[in-house]
Amino acid sequence: MASTIPITMMLTRQGAHDVENMYYTAKSKKEDDPGQALEEFRAIVDQETERGDWGFKALKQSTKLLFLTLHRPTDALASYIKLLTYTKSAVTRNYSEKTINGILDYVGGGKGGVVEVDVLERFYAATNEALEEAKNERLSVKTNLKLAKLWLDRKEYGRLQKIIRELHAATRAAMDSEDQSQRGTQLLEIYALEIQMHNEMRNVKKLKEIYNASNNVRSAIPHPRIMGVIKECGGKMWMGERQWSLASSDFFESFRNYDEAGSPQRIQVLKYLVLANMLTGSEVNPFDSQETKPYKSDPQIKQ
């Protein structure tokens, strides 16, 4: 087995001008020797005289290694906080936003093993602090929407309600400065989270209130998955009230939107649609429509 060259010697031999080679050498070791790769990424950052693109890339790789491979979330957080200082001037706004989104996606995606809630919360708090300093309200809202989804998935309803209040406040504050379609789209995303929360908490009165509010949003271009969520919960609400026709209508809209979004949830909602249609006593076959016809023989529907 070849001996590892000391990092300081690599720096002396190659000099700062060869930092690109150092970066790709470190990157090539990520799978076979993540500890050594991490050390070499850190060396790139340590030798910088001023924050630059390669230091940012090295911190990005370090954060990912620490969180996903080495399962050291607290150390990953420290690396991430340092990375955020580079977003002020070392890299472009688009690149920094893409990197932040990517990191928060895997941090909140459950791929790093068991992570304490407080550590997760600090990732988002550090992000929002940096975004507030950069006056990037749009990405700040997007970050809080990710955090809200994380708390919903973890059934952290107290934390979720706090974030939802902050999101509503940010949306109201942006009424004059943003175009109405962007505000409406944002509002529907918040409502979708609230509707899911109240559905899980069996808070029917609040669920209906938010559902009705979502139907009153006119200027919006939401992602079809968001409408799939809202209409699915609406269908369940109507089922609880024995309003079979309204339930059938909402389940169809939910299915159509989930199908457009490519979401596997479309199959479950299609089952709900079949049930609601049976309860209406209607003789109309739910598989006669252009949208549902391809799923008529799907084995999952017959389960």
Image (cartoon, rainbow, N blue to C red):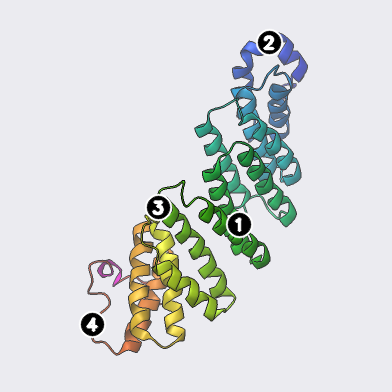
Residue type of the residue flagged with mark 2: Gly
Q: Position of residue 27 (x, y in %)?
A: 61, 28
Q: Determine which residue is flagged by label 4.
A: 284
In the rendered image, the vertical position of residue 268 relative to residue 247, given as above or below? above
Q: Determine if the magenta segment contains residue 201.
A: no
In the rendered image, the vertical position of residue 34 relative to residue 217, given as above or below? above
Q: From the viewer's perspective, is the residue at label 3 or at label 2 nearer? A: 3
Distance of label 1 from label 4 (alpha carbons): 45 Å
Mark 2: give few (<14), some (14-19) or many (20+) Cα within 10 Å. Answer: few
Residue 166 image label: 1
> At numbered mark 2, what does the secondary structure look like: helix, strand or loop?
loop
Mark 3: give few (<14), some (14-19) or many (20+) Cα within 10 Å. Answer: some
Distance of label 4 from label 2 (alpha carbons): 75 Å
Q: Earlier in the sequence, mark 4 or mark 2?
A: 2
Which quadrant of the figure has residue 244?
A: bottom left
The magenta segment: 292-296
Q: Earlier in the sequence, mark 1 or mark 4?
A: 1
Residue type of the residue flagged with mark 3: Gln
Label 1 with label 3: CB-CB less than 8 Å: no
**Residue at the front extreme?**
176
Residue 180 image label: 3
Towards the viewer: 168 or 238: 168
